[in-house]
Amino acid sequence: MSTSLMNPSEAPSTVPPPRRARRFPGWLVGVLGVAGAVVLISTTSYLTDVPQLTSTGTVQTAVRLALPILLAGLGGLWAERAGVVNIGLEGMMIMGTWGAAWAGYQWGPWAALVSAAVFGALGGLLHAIATVTFGVNHIVSGVAINLLGAGLAKYLSTLIFFPLSHNPRESPAVPKFDTYSTPLLSDWLGDLESQQRVGLSDVAGILRGLVTGVSPLTMVAVLLVIGTYLVLWRTRFGLRLRSCGENPVAAESLGVNVYRYKYLAVLASGALAGIGGAALVLNPGQPGYLEGQTNGRGFIGLAAMIFGNWRPGGLLGGAALFGYADGLQLRSGGKTFLALVYGAVLLLGAIVVWQLVRRRWFAAAGGIVAAVVLYAVYYSVDEVPSELTTYAPHLVTLVVLAAASQRLRMPAADGLVYRRG
Amino acid sequence: MSTQVTSTTPAVVLSGITKRFPGVVANSDVHLSVATGEVHALCGENGAGKSTLMKILYGMQQPDEGTIEVAGEQVRFRTPADAIKAGIGMVHQHFMLADNLTVQENVVLGAEALHGIGGKARRRIQELAKATGLTVDPGVLVERLGVADRQRVEILKVLYRGARVIILDEPTAVLVPQEVDELFTTLRGMQAQGFTFLFISHKLDEVRAIADSVTVIRRGTTVGTADPKAVSSRQLAEMMVGSELPSPETRESTVTERVVLDVRGLGLVADDRPVLDGIDLVVRSGEVVGIAGVEGNGQTELVETIMGIRRAHRGTVVLGERDISRLGTLARREAGIGYVPEDRHRQGLLLEQPLWANRILGYQTRRPVSRGPWLDLVGAKKDTERIVAEFDVRTPGIDVAAAALSGGNQQKLVVGRELSGDPVLLIASHPTRGVDVGAQALIWDEIKRARARGLAVLLISADLDELIGLSDTIKVMLRGRLVADADPATVTPEDLGSAMTGAGATSAAVVEVEGD
Amino acid sequence: MGILRGKLLPPVLAILFSALLCGVALVVSGANPLRAFGVMVSQVGEGTTAVDIVNSTGTYYIAALAVAIGFQMNLFNIGVEGQYRVAAVVAAVVGGSIALPPGVHTLVVILVAAVVGALWAAIPAVLKVTRGVNEVISTIMMNGLALGLAAYLIRSDVFGELRGNNIRTPEIPASGWMPGIPLGSSGTVFGFVFVAALLGIGYWVMMNRTRFGFELRASGESSTAATAGGVSAKKMVLIAMLLSGGIAGLVSMPEILGRDHTYSLNFPAGIGFSGIAIALLGRNHPGGIAFGALLWAFLDKSALALDNVGVPREIVTIMQGAIVLSVVVAYEVVRRFELAAQQRQVGKELGTVGAA
């Protein structure tokens, strides 16, 4: 079990020929993506007559639910960019929830955040020791940390929270952050939203959701995304860190201390996952720590990272999508969720047209079949059962992996055990 | 690194370098002196210890004994960073580039302190790029570059760090002839600017074309330094392989009329690029057909296509009377093909399994190692004992892991196994690469003996003397095609070399194949 | 010497280390670790604990075997968790809705479970073989989907029924049960525990005595060498994954056939992940896995007694996690040490010194 996670099958004996350069700048892709998503959602909202799709409340809930996914995904991004697969995110997140509650009920939300980061980083440290120093398979170590994190949180919760809350599975209530709104802007957008104008009101609703009742936590998360991008792609430290995930042998040959960067990356990864746990505890809808409250969100964070092709902007998109799906379900139930299926049909339609333009007949045919199936689902079902909507992110990730695995670009040495020398 | 180094002070002196690994000595008492401003070639066969020596000079490994002097001062390199500081740079044979990073990122990595990672670094790179002939934008991802440009990026990397002594580890192995010429032009230009090169190669024609002096290394130790203009390739070759050089004697031919392997019109496309193109090949019973070629010209793909590891896009493979084009690897093996793969660690052995389990690999459907769906452990162990005895595999027993054996003994085990299943055809890729001379001689003898019994052999080797010594017919492979036939009785390594690099036939012993 | 050092030392060290770790944790939290351990051991003799341990061992054993088959060829079937869950629901639904003679009925339930588990595993297997999707990610996603699907299928308006405040599938009639060995007040040993043992023997024979097992191990150790040796990597991935999923499908059988006769919301979770831990501890060896499963079951069931001495019983979960992590580290360290030692030994015995 010491060998790599990914058997690089048949290393090409010759280097592939140069590929045509055809690349848009990242910010443009982001802007187009956001614009496309807004258009898609407004159109869906209009055609299905489900205004909740773009209501302020839905967006607000979506943001709250997206935060833990986003932060866990960022954690995954840091580790994987340095070449360490971290499926221990879930365990680190659980440790973060406990740490947040423990510090939070005593010293307030900011302390909760710091404590969660420390507890998460402890999990990260363990992962780094196992995978980097001892060369243990990353998946194996991750599974062990998930077990350990869950056990530790349960144990500590029984030991420390039980006497206070009289429930071994719950912490005392944790104070939350105050939220902030931009009153004038909010009101103006509120007016626009209530005018029910096609498109415009949708945009207003979405924007209003983003600027109303903003928690400092949201701002911290956004700053962390931007900071991650700047640190990993615009600094010497980040370049070195990423080089460890792409070709550690080359990095080492150029004097980069690969072990050190991997350690730092995995520590950061754990801390971010921990903060993701804090985002759950500090969610206004929750009293505090609750056993099982992460409910696989560490894994969804990983999924969001894959969805985002191992890039912060993409990850933000993935987390937003998964959070949105979650928020819609929580807020308005399975009937409105069904509108998303309709949206997926529209999206597929657009993809099919694109594939036809590019004369990719096979891909287009696949898209048509999928669209027809989805439309049949939309047509024949009244609502999507809540049991299934929870797991929409999982399905989306599987589909993305199956359809676009060739286009996804994970760090080249991701998951490979690196031995110095 | 003072600038007043006179041309009489050698740029690099290695004295008495010895490096041991568990069970083997990779370098023993190596002496090497490189003058400032020269292109110094280090020649030796695969496995002679060149790479280990260069890793020591570049700080990737520490010598057990011996000293290193750079520009007259004794140094100790603990890491490559130390070597870089001393002005030594290395261009690795297997490029040390991260595909998913840009050219600029690859160049500045580890040397960010010099010019940062932004615009200043970019300008510096563009300045230096001219010397290497690199014309692409530094912001381009390395994965978009071709092989020659990647090599330029590697050279750019060491220039950027201010290296004055540049180690080039088999830089031409992956290049096509025009690219080799371009590289040599670049090197001469840089030499004029005062750079010193240590050029590792086992291709003698190239050494003679570029080097000012050449040091030969054999079995881990240096055997002498010569002026490549003053010695013949033949003399150099003898220095490289010692007295063991098989003289291409005319032997009694055992070639029969019975065709064993008949390959027709074989074509393979990878990444939208033809890797094999219209290969016609016949191997007869009792015949050794050798394939000569610079590595990366399709030999690996040819072998793997005949073995059914890769799927041919065109053409047929007939073994004896039977068309095996549609069969899988196992069925082809069962049909009577023995296969000595080019990389015994990756393809030939299960390193952590005992020797007897390695005997089963590839033969899992046949006696004596299995019966139907069941393994026959007693039979496997008994037959492994036989191979160990017959092929002189030096091992304490058949229960040790294959990884514990030395390279030569591992290879003897592989060859022994592949000659065990009553094959009609043996495909041997670099059968003696990286093995000691004793094992080399034994493997050669076994191949000759099997040939005498009527075995057909397809031999791929980078060792031209091995090819000439063993083959009855030699075919030259270039860019996925068989471009020339050579008669091993009369051909010289130089003739072969020029045919391999596309320079065309230079003697009557090489006949170019008709075609476009 | 080699066997002792290489195979037995790491788990012993790991267990001791983890026990020490937990002991320290207990001391810090003001409890007496020796007393805690004492009550855990004496708990085995109480009530039905001993039988519960045996039954639980059987369940864990099957899960770990399923994982081990994948591990043998470096295939990470993280999806055992989802495979057994979906298999359990479907088998319970089918078993509860058909009427067949005793024996046949039971067999059908078992067969359905195995097939459903294999089918659920087939999705990541096909994705891996045809699209190159990494099985770790896809099986994690399949686990989530399995939870959703199971929850959906037992809704009272789908296949489930409401009993008290528990929702569950219709009960399987007695003809579909599997008899156990009643031991009076000590409980009843599930019949399927013996099937689990048979599976272990079958697994050993397959891995060590059959061509298929050899090909599986060869693919796991070196996919390139296996390919050159005529083993089709894709075929092996498919078969190994289906086999692993099929066995994973049986994880729920001891309890469904022996006691519950239904799938309910209270169905135990996390057995798949425990299975991974046990397979690692037992190093994919059927004997080692049996020991690991027994240890896990003992820790689980005896932990109930800890509440009596004021120690949170979750300490055993920490211990389990610590054991896995330290055992993989110990195996890795010992493996490297052994390989180097063997190379030195061969070098010494032969006195061969030459360039390699």
Image: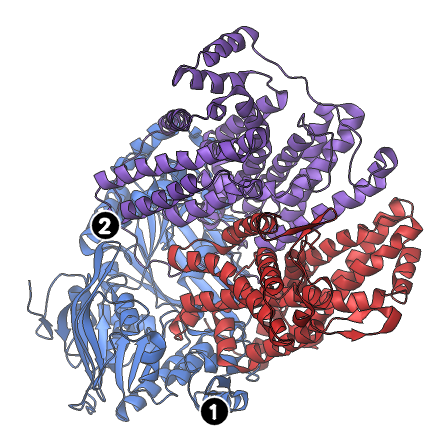
Chain colours: A purple, B blue, C red
Residue B66 visible in image: yes
> In the displayed structure, would residue B334 be above or below residue C21?
below
Residue A241, given in percent of the width and then of the height, sits at 51, 39
At horizontal 53% and vertical 6% (from top left) the residue drawn is A184
In what element is the residue under mark 1?
A: helix
> In the displayed structure, would residue C64 be above or below residue A323?
below
**Residue wearing tag 1:** B386
**Distance (Cα) linking label 2 and label 1:** 51 Å
> In the displayed structure, would residue A50 be above or below residue C271?
above
Badge 2 amino acid? Phe
Question: Pointer 2 indicates a residue of which chain?
Answer: B
At horizontal 69% and vertical 42% (from top left) the residue drawn is A292
Residue B478 has which mark? none
For the view shown, which residue lies furthest in the front direction?
C99
Residue B184 has which mark? 2
Residue B457, given in percent of the width and then of the height, sits at 26, 82
N-terminal label among 2 and 1: 2
**C279, B59: nearer the viewer:** C279
Quadrant where the N terminus of chain C is found in the figure: bottom right
Tell me how many marks there are: 2
Q: Is residue B475 left or right of residue C63?
A: left
Question: Pointer 1 indicates a residue of which chain?
Answer: B
Residue C80, given in percent of the width and then of the height, sits at 59, 59
**C329, B491: nearer the viewer:** C329
